[in-house]
């Protein structure tokens, strides 16, 4: 009898949650949401399965997800196996021709297809592609900065100069979920390695997405006391960066957020991809998750 009563309470809680989600389901009906998937969750099978299930649920609720993924740790593992040395300058991987071959193999191959397979296993219809397909991202060469601010050649590292999202819109008009590897084409036929956050921001801006979700391994943007700031304006982000409160690895993410908003994205959320159902909490609950940045 006690077990039956407990089960009833669980089902009632589930029904209440679904009922409370209704306004948010209506709010995001038909909305395009670009999600940068990376960090801890990519290397954990259980987290990958949970993420894939959430993405399929979003699509089922008529939210239009576009997944852009990273894969740095997997690239590092393969480079080590092949005894190819690699270095980072200012958070960007110096990419020569040999490194680029491995980067493309890992990102467009094993990493991309693992995400595609996980989504398909949950009943979705995911399709893997890279920024080279249908000229999705046309890149210019990106330079790094040394300790003294001098420019450093990073090799085949690119910045999206032009985004042509027609191929993604074609998928979104169907039942398919696009999963994009952060590679781009150069105007002279080169292949460029693109930072995953940068690629996601450029695609979100190109599609004028309703939301860009940057999944990371921290809870969000924190204030001087270490508490997560749940909502910020672009101006507040610039002020906190100038004061040194936003620092280190958070700076590239907030810079991506500001560029995306300037490019027409309605809002960007930096949130902890390790938290179960982070995307669903952000979109479909009053509480939300992480730090929301608006213009």
Image (tube, rainbow, N blue to C red):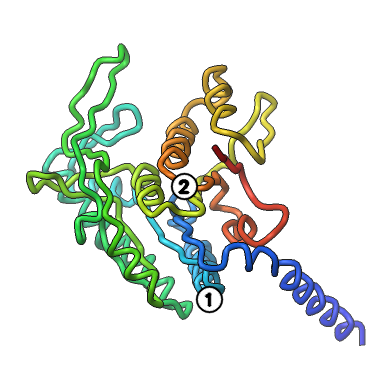
Q: Which residue is mark 1?
A: 60
Q: How many numbered circles does the render carry?
A: 2
Where residue 231 sits, quadrant-wise, is top right
Q: Badge 2: how crowded within 10 Å, few (<14), some, or many (20+)?
A: many
Q: Is 6 or 265 nearer to us in this picture?
A: 265
| Quadrant of the drawing holding the N terminus | bottom right
**Residue at the spot x=23%, y=36% of the render?**
86
Residue 85, x across and y down, in percent: 20, 37
Residue 117 visible within the image: yes
The residue sitting at the right extreme is 1
Q: Badge 1: how crowded within 10 Å, few (<14), some, or many (20+)?
A: few
**Residue at the spot x=51%, y=62% of the render?**
31
* Left or right: 248 as drawn, with respect to 183: right
First along the sequence among labels 2 and 1 = 1
Q: Nearer the viewer, mark 2 or mark 1?
A: 2
Q: Secondary structure at mark 1?
A: helix
**Residue at the spot x=64%, y=50% of the render?**
289
* Left or right: 58 as drawn, with respect to 19: left
Residue 292, x across and y down, in percent: 60, 43
**Residue at the spot x=43%, y=42% of the render?**
260
Q: Which residue is mark 2?
A: 265
The residue sitting at the left extreme is 188
Tell me the distance, in whole angstroms, between the alpha carbons under discs 2 and 1. Answer: 23 Å
* Left or right: 278 as drawn, with respect to 55: right
């Amino acid at each position: 009898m006690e077990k039956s009563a407990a089960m009833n309470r669980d089902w009632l809680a589930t029904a209440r949650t679904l009922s409370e989600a209704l306004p948010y389901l209506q709010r995001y009906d038909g909305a395009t949401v670009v999600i940068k998937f990376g960090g801890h969750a990519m290397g954990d099978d259980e987290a990958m399965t949970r993420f894939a299930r959430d993405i399929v649920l979003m699509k089922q609720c008529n939210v239009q997800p576009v997944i852009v993924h990273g894969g740095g740790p997997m690239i590092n593992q393969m480079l080590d196996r092949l005894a190819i040395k690699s270095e980072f300058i200012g958070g960007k991987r110096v990419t020569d021709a040999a490194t680029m071959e491995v980067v493309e193999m890992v990102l467009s191959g094993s990493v991309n297809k693992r995400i595609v397979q996980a989504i398909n296993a949950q009943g979705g219809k995911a399709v893997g592609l890279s920024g080279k397909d249908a000229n999705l991202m046309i890149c210019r060469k990106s330079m790094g900065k040394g300790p003294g601010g001098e420019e450093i050649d990073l090799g085949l590292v690119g910045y999206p100069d032009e985004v042509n999202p027609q191929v993604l819109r074609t998928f979104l008009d169907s039942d398919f979920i696009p999963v994009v590897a952060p590679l781009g084409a150069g105007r002279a036929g080169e292949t460029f390695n693109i930072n995953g956050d940068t690629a996601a921001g450029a695609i979100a801006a190109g599609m004028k997405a309703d939301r860009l979700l940057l999944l990371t391994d921290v809870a969000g943007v924190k204030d001087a006391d270490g508490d997560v700031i749940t909502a910020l304006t672009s101006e507040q982000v610039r002020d906190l960066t100038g004061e040194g409160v936003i620092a280190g690895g958070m700076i590239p993410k907030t810079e991506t957020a500001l560029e995306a908003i300037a490019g027409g994205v309605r809002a960007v959320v930096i949130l902890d991809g390790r938290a179960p159902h982070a995307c669903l909490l952000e979109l479909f609950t009053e509480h939300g998750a992480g730090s929301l940045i608006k213009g």
